Every structure is written in C-alpha cells, then in structure tokens.
Amino acid sequence: MRGSGEAGAKPQHATARVWGMGYGVWGMGYGVWGMGMGMGMGMGRILSGPLMTRLVAILAYTLLPLSYAVGGSFDHSHRAWTELLRQHVVLIDGGSGSQVRYAELKNRRTELKAYLDTLSSVALAEFERWSKAQQLAFLLNAYNAFTVELILTRYPDLESIRDFGRFIDNPWKKRFFKLLGQEQNLDGIEHGVIRAPGVYDEPRIHTAVNCASIGCPMLREEAYIADRLAAQLEEQVVRFLSDHSRNRYDAATHTLEVSEIFDWYREDFSSGFQGIRSREQFFAKYAELLTDDPGGQNLIRRQQAKIRFVDYDWALNDFKG
C-alpha cells in the first residue's frame, strides 16, 4: 500500500531496457524459425501463418524469465499480464463489475505461467529498491495473477474458490508459489505484506485484490502500474461503490447496505488515509455513488445512515456468455 501522500513512480529507464531485451527475445524467436526454415521448406510450410505466429509468441513468453535472469530489468508495465486481462476479462454492469473467461484463459496457461515466473524471479533485495508504488503494483498483480492460476488448476470442476477447502486445502493459506525468495500464499501477500502496518497504509487495495468471486470487487481489465496506481485505485473504489448489487442505500430504512469487506477490514478504512478516520467518513466522501436520492446523500454525508452488511457471494466470477 502507498502512504497517504502521492507516490509518483521513479523514471522508467528500467522499462526501456526491458523492451530492449524483449525485442531481443523476439529476434531470437525469429532466429529460431529462420533455422527451422533452413532445415527444410516442407517444415517451413507447416509452421507458417497463424500457427507460426502462435508458436513464436509462446517462445517469447517462455524466454521472458530467462531474459530477466541474464541481466534484464523487471518490466514494471506488467505488459504480459495486461495482455491476458484485456483478452479474457469481460466488463459487466456498465463497467462496475467484471467476469473472467476462464475457459479461454485455460488455453493460455503457458503465457500466464511465464508471467508468474517473472514475478517469482524477483529477489527481495531488488524489490526493496523499488518505489512504494512499484512495490504495491507488483503485489496487487501477483495476488490477482496467482489467484487466477489457482482457479485454472481445477477449472471447470469448481463453482467457487471455496471448493478448494476451508481448512486443509484452504486456497488463501496454501503455499503454492514462490515470491520474494520464499514459499508464499495469498494471505501472505495481502495480510503479511500489503496490509502490514506502516508500510503502504492504503485501504483502497481492498477494491483491487480479487478473490475470483462475484461478491469481490471486480478483477481489473489491466495490470496495476506505478505511474497510474493512484488513479487506478480510485477508479476501483468508484466502480465498486457504484455497483448497487453490492453497495447501495435503502431510502425506506435510511440504511447503507454495503459489502462485508467494510466489516472485515473496518480498521483499514478508519486508519486516517486521506484524513478519513471511520467507515462513515469514507462513505460520506462517495455519497453520490451510493444513491441518487438527494436526501439519502445528505444523510450519508452527515454520517447518520445506518449500516448493514450484505452477504458475500462466493460464486465463481466465471463468464458464461
């Protein structure tokens, strides 16, 4: 999480070097195909057109972790993750929610795993040299990408992330990946690193991490990046509070009916971020998103609305269209 002040990203010279390496990988890919063509025109004809393009792309993704290991810098644009998200995340409800094409994404696990490998290859010492915004973007993307990978290990034979188990095979406590030099789990990223007191102190992360469930704030259709992290997080808050299936105002009872996230993480929304010391004060800032009723907006702004928590929907956020 970022601190309460604006955390601008450092100059992206490292990103430019990554793209230089990236083009080198593509060059290497075409070099491989050049060798293939030299071995026989018949093979060249077989590996032409869409199939050739697809295989070159797979080769490039496969070589990405190697390129970092031999001296490339980490790609803070998270371009590989953005490409997968843009192709397989579907915006719904006017953009306030999203669902995932897991069936199609399952066929792209080679690319997904290559991206995950680049995350796992980052050493703690390197991570600690990054800006806070770069660190937080990295952690948010890691949480979401590893969650998607976890779902794909069982898809389509599950209806909820909770199907993995509540105790022995708990999806949030299971250590199934490596991050920053140690075996890690999803809880470790969110509660052990992102929510660690005094590190980022950013409550809006609760609208950015996605647990592959309908009740969870939407999986964003692009990667989080340091340059735009503040704006991305704010947009996630706006989207989540604009979704009246999960957050709304009941004028008949003068009650705010909001996600259980605001119950589970009450202390985060009362931590003083941007001067906000309570959940009620947080809702007051976004009153116009929670209802179109002027009287209700005034009640929310005066922090006098009652609060009730809506049951969480743990059904998988799978796109069926």
Image (spheres, rainbow, N blue to C red):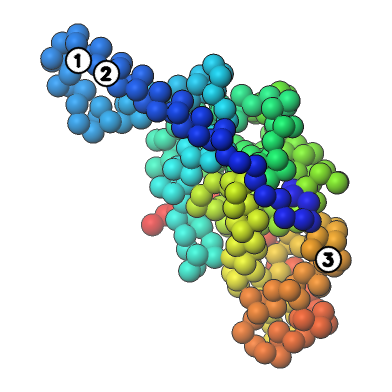
Assign a secondary structure to mark 3. Answer: helix
Q: Residues within 10 Å of mark 2 (few under 14, many from 20)?
A: some
Q: Which mark is residue 33?
A: 2
Total labels drawn: 3
Give the amino acid type for the residue marked by disc 1 in the picture. Answer: Met
Q: Residues within 10 Å of mark 3 (few under 14, many from 20)?
A: few
Residue 254 location, x and y as percent?
Answer: 75, 85
Q: Which residue is mark 3?
A: 275
With 1 as the anchor, is 98 left or right in this view? left
At a point 73% along the width and 25% down the height, the residue shown is: 125
Looking at the rendering, in which quadrant would you find the C terminus? Answer: bottom left
Q: Give the distance between the C-alpha atoms of the residues marked 2 and 3, in whole angstroms.
A: 58 Å
For residue 165, say whether it is visible: no
Dot 3 or dot 1, earlier in sequence: 1
Give the amino acid type for the residue marked by disc 3 in the picture. Answer: Gly
Residue projecting furthest to the top: 39
Q: Give the distance between the C-alpha atoms of the residues marked 3 and 1, in whole angstroms.
A: 64 Å
Give the amino acid type for the residue marked by disc 2 in the picture. Answer: Trp
At a point 20% along the width and 31% down the height, the residue shown is: 49
Q: Which residue is mark 1?
A: 37
Rendered position, 33 above or below 179: above
